[in-house]
Amino acid sequence: MSRIVIATRESRLALWQAEHVQSLLAERGHEVTLLGMTTRGDQILDRSLSKVGGKGLFVKELEVALEEGRADIAVHSLKDVPMDLPEGFALACVMEREDPRDAFVSPQYASLEALPSGAVVGTSSLRRVVLLRALRPDLRIEPLRGNLDTRLRKLDEGQYDAIVLAAAGLRRLGLAGRIRATFEPAQMLPAAGQGALGIEVRADRGELFAALAPLSHQTSWLAVAAERAVSRAMGGSCSMPLAAFATFSGEYLQLQAAWGDPEGSNALVRARSAASVADLGTAAALGAEVASRLRAGGAR
């Protein structure tokens, strides 16, 4: 039996994710405890993430705990993890992906199409902003920050007519009943890594790679690796207005991406490609190819 400490944010969803990993490791004979932490991303709620440093603000304090030896692993929603980890850190595991789609949540309206012109939709994701504007340029898209429970409370208080959230988080917390509709990828392409959990460790902790290997899901890892490679090639920011989503069809990984200008036209630049993918290297090459096609189409 080995002892493993998990560094985690203290939001309800982050704790669910850490406790899920804790349970799986405990089943395999490890003694696992949690180290709860509040990150800068949790503290800064009056500005959009794109203006204060991106989603990396959710992981930095956890990485410090790993570096100082106060924790052994950190469990992240992979869409919140910067495309390039700091030197000395590595993703040891990507777990089987949950529902990667976005969810439409509203107490009054059944779908995006049912919203009246001028209705207020809440999101602080630049990706969702450009995709929503492409679908419904007549809506008001307003910033929405806070953890999942805070966002739902703001919706229920009437600050928004609808909000868009990741379906995976709602399902994990037993809140699937709040979902009025899910956006199919053809309508609203997910973020790179959306719905997948990644486990970060110090790169020199070989024993942890071995302990986490049984939790890894190879097809999920290859898909999100291709998606994250698109983002990396486009500049590496979690806060850019970029979507990327990959699915397997046999041995072929089909990858599509979309980019929009948050300050300009409602038109999207789209690109797609497919390749036989069996390892992280070929997944990354596919992502780089799709990013090249996006840039050729005018994305920046």
Image: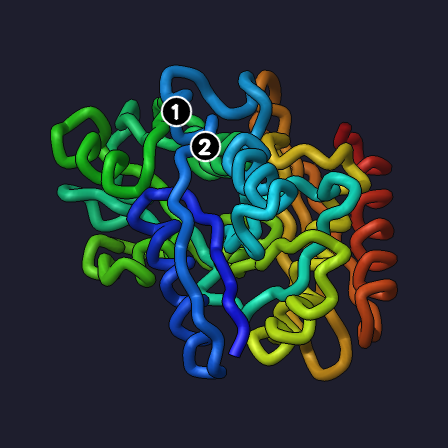
Is residue 154 shown to the viewer in this render? yes
Residue 253 lies, with reference to residue 119, above or below; the image says: below
Whole-percent x and y of residue 225?
72, 58
Alpha-carbon neighbours of circle 2 within 10 Å: few (<14), some, or many (≥20)? some
Residue 113 lies, with reference to residue 44, above or below; the image says: below
- Judging from the image, what secondary structure is the residue with disc 1 in? helix
Instruction: Give me the residue at 69% from left, 52% from top.
Output: 202
Which sits in the foreground, 128 or 265?
128
| Residue receiving disc 2 | 39
Whole-percent x and y of residue 170?
31, 55
Relative to 99, 176 lies left or right: left
* Amino acid type for the residue under numbered disc 1: Gln
Is residue 189 shown to the viewer in this render? no
Residue 193 found in image quarter? bottom right
Relative to 293, 101 lies left or right: left
| Residue receiving disc 1 | 43
Residue 212 found in image quarter? bottom right
Alpha-carbon neighbours of circle 1 within 10 Å: few (<14), some, or many (≥20)? few
- Judging from the image, what secondary structure is the residue with disc 2 in? loop
Between the C-alphas of marks 2 and 1, the distance is 7 Å
